[in-house]
Image: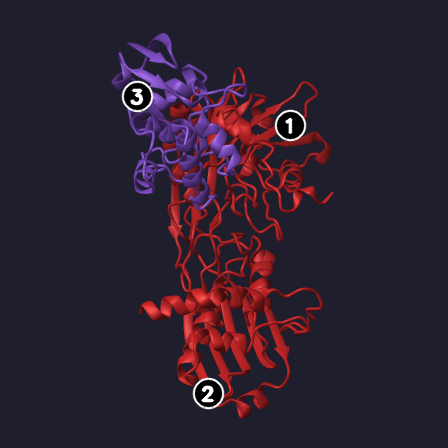
């Protein structure tokens, strides 16, 4: 067992884990944060996206120990029904949610983009979301939702 | 009442999903749960000569190792029960489930599955539908489907085909084929099964058919349907791929046998091996038209590769036959549609359900005919499309609204723009 210290959704966590544990397993199983989803287990689909120190990562291909000392944001740390994040509201209003399995990762990828670049071009949105696969929507509504959220963030 | 039409409606479950609150089966756990894994066949066609599970059963932490001998009624399937829960002897495809292990951890369950010793006798396999259709080809399902691998044939006949060829000025004859496709729904199969305080089975799963699943589980275990509760959680995509029963059947058996909650999750790779695929179809099309660009005759032969098990194949090849003309009036035709067993992965429902594959054939034929007749692709379609009052190949009178002409006319200016660009 090794000791792992990290911040998850603003809370400091200290855990004892096996060295081989993946970040997704620590989040889902040890911390009960099941909003992070596993789709492929090899960093292709983006369902397991979380934000680490401001950058999106695939938590299925990151060892938990690599997150030692880092700051992690999962979907549970973004918005709530009373005060949703603009990306979350836009996803609901644009119909960008279907089966919902890619949604947490999509929301986090969009949030990470807008945090850095509040007024992205369609190409920049496309590039930022390219690591997240959706099998239901055909992407159009997702891209529209990110544009809508950007308008809300910038107040235009 | 009409307020929904023309207005934006928010999905009922959308808010829960954007906060990551929606629960899929892999998100659930119960105290004391064990983890189940399935060992699947690496062979496309083989006989199991022997299976030694002693080492697996003796591994500390293993709660149960189930083989075909543990399944009271070892069959399932949506139309025909031609699929074994666990193969007893005859392996028909790569991915056929051979045994299930339940253990205290996933790693232990996998380790135990690796300790099982199986002796196989590989058999000659059929991968090509034409080969599988030949008289004398070894039948894959003599018990359920008889001595032919062709287990479904639908002929559709309309008008007088000889007359059709007589009046045709141009005839185009081509072969088309489509490939096998996986749904690749984003959420791999997962299930949590347990026996409740009253001794009833509770299965929490993402399924397209909870009522079917109940029946399949009760059938396999030989218990009353009323003793099985199937609860559908959020479904992470399915597109037809969750119509057939999957891990929930095996998890139910492990829970029933051990009285422990059982959790099972497919990896993406296991998911590819375990569920059905879209039918590859081989389509031979011969289409005749007059110089005026009117379709007059069609002869089509559609062969769907069902893979190793029937699943929904008859319904899918029926749909392919019904849609074989596309949205075009053809007075004289014969369509023959077949579903054929091979040792390929089994095929079943997937978006379009057999209507998607013939599009490649009939629309390509239209384009080639247009070329031969010196017509634009749009013009040849306008001369043949279904309109209100059209009668389809199967004799259905389209008495209601048919919006195709209106649609094509709206699209036409954009097509012309594209042509001008070229």
Residue displayed at 50% across by 60% down: B356
Display coloring: by chain
Q: Residue B170 carries which label?
A: 2
Calculate the distance from the C-alpha at mark 2 to the C-alpha at mark 1: 63 Å
Calculate the distance from the C-alpha at mark 2 to the C-alpha at mark 3: 65 Å
Q: Nearer the viewer, residue A101 or B122?
A: A101
- The image shows residue B335 at horizontal and vertical percentages of 56, 74
Helix, strand or loop at mark 1: strand
Q: Is residue B401 above or below residue B226?
A: below
Left or right: where B207 falls relative to A36: right
**Would residue B132 be visible to someone looking at this image?**
no
Q: Which of A77 and B417 is in front in this view?
A: B417
- The chain that hosts pointer 3 is A
Q: Nearer the viewer, residue B410 or B129?
A: B410
Q: In the picture, which chain is purple?
A: A
Q: Are marks 2 and 3 in contact (CB under 8 Å)?
A: no
Q: In this view, does B279 lie above or below B53?
A: below
Residue displayed at 58% across by 37% down: B71
Residue displayed at 70% across by 65% down: B400
**Could you tell me which quadrant the C terminus of chain B lies in?**
bottom left
Q: Residues within 10 Å of mark 2 (few under 14, many from 20)?
A: some
- The chain that hosts pointer 2 is B
Q: In the picture, which chain is red?
A: B
**Could you tell me which quadrant the N terminus of chain B lies in?**
top right
Q: Residue A52 carries which label?
A: 3
Report whether mark 2 lies on the same chain as mark 1.
Answer: yes
- The chain that hosts pointer 1 is B
Q: In this view, does B120 lie above or below B56?
A: below
Reading the image, the residue beneath label 1 is: B201
Report whether mark 3 lies on the same chain as mark 1.
Answer: no
């Amino acid at each position: 067992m090794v000791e792992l210290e990290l911040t998850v959704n603003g809370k400091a966590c200290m855990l004892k884990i096996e060295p081989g544990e993946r970040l997704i397993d620590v989040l889902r199983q040890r911390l009960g944060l099941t909003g992070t989803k596993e789709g492929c287990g090899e960093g292709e689909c983006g369902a397991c996206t979380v934000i680490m120190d401001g950058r999106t990562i695939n938590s299925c291909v990151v060892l938990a120990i690599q997150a030692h000392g880092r700051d992690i944001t999962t979907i549970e740390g973004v918005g709530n029904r009373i005060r949703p994040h603009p990306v979350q509201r836009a996803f609901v209003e644009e119909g960008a949610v279907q089966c919902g399995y890619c949604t947490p990762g999509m929301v986090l990828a969009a949030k990470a983009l807008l945090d850095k670049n509040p007024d992205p071009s369609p190409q920049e949105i496309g590039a930022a979301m390219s690591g997240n696969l959706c099998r239901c929507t055909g992407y159009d509504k997702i891209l529209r939702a990110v544009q809508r959220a950007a308008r809300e963030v910038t107040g235009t | 009442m009409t307020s929904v039409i023309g207005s934006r409606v928010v999905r009922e479950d959308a808010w829960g999903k954007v906060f990551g609150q929606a629960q899929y089966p892999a998100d659930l756990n119960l105290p004391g749960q064990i983890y189940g894994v399935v060992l699947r066949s690496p062979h496309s066609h083989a006989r199991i000569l022997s299976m030694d599970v002693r080492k697996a059963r003796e591994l500390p932490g293993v709660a149960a190792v189930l083989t075909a001998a543990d399944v009271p009624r070892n069959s399932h399937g949506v139309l025909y029960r031609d699929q074994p829960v666990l193969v007893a002897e005859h392996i028909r495809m790569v991915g056929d489930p051979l045994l299930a292990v339940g253990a205290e951890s996933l790693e232990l369950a996998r380790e135990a599955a690796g300790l099982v010793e199986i002796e196989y006798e590989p058999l000659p396999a059929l991968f090509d539908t034409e080969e599988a259709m030949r008289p004398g080809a070894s039948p894959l399902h003599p018990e359920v489907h008889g001595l032919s691998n062709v287990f479904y044939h639908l002929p559709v006949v309309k008008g007088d085909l000889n007359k059709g060829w007589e009046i045709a000025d141009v005839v185009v004859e081509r072969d088309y084929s489509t490939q096998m496709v996986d749904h690749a729904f984003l959420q791999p199969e997962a299930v949590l099964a347990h026996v409740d305080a009253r001794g009833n089975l509770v299965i929490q799963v993402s399924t397209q058919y909870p009522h079917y699943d109940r029946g399949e589980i009760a059938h396999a275990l030989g218990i009353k349907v009323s003793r099985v509760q199937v609860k559908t959680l959020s479904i992470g995509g399915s597109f037809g791929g969750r119509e057939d029963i999957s891990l929930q059947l095996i998890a139910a058996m492990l829970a029933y046998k051990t009285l422990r909650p059982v959790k099972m999750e497919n990896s993406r790779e296991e998911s590819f091996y375990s569920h059905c695929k879209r039918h590859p179809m081989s389509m031979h099309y011969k289409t005749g038209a007059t110089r005026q660009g009117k379709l007059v005759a069609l002869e089509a032969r559609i062969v769907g590769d069902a893979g190793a098990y029937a699943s929904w194949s008859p319904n899918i090849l029926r749909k392919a036959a019904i849609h074989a003309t596309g949205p075009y009036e053809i007075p004289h035709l014969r369509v023959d549609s077949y579903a054929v067993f091979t040792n390929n992965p089994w095929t079943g429902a997937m978006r379009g359900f057999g209507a998607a594959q013939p599009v490649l054939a009939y629309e390509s034929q239209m384009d080639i005919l247009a070329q031969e007749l010196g017509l634009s692709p749009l013009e040849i379609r306008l001369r043949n499309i279904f309109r209100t009052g059209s009668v389809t190949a199967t004799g259905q009178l389209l008495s209601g609204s048919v919006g195709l002409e209106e649609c094509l006319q709206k699209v036409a200016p954009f097509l012309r723009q594209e042509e001008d660009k070229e």
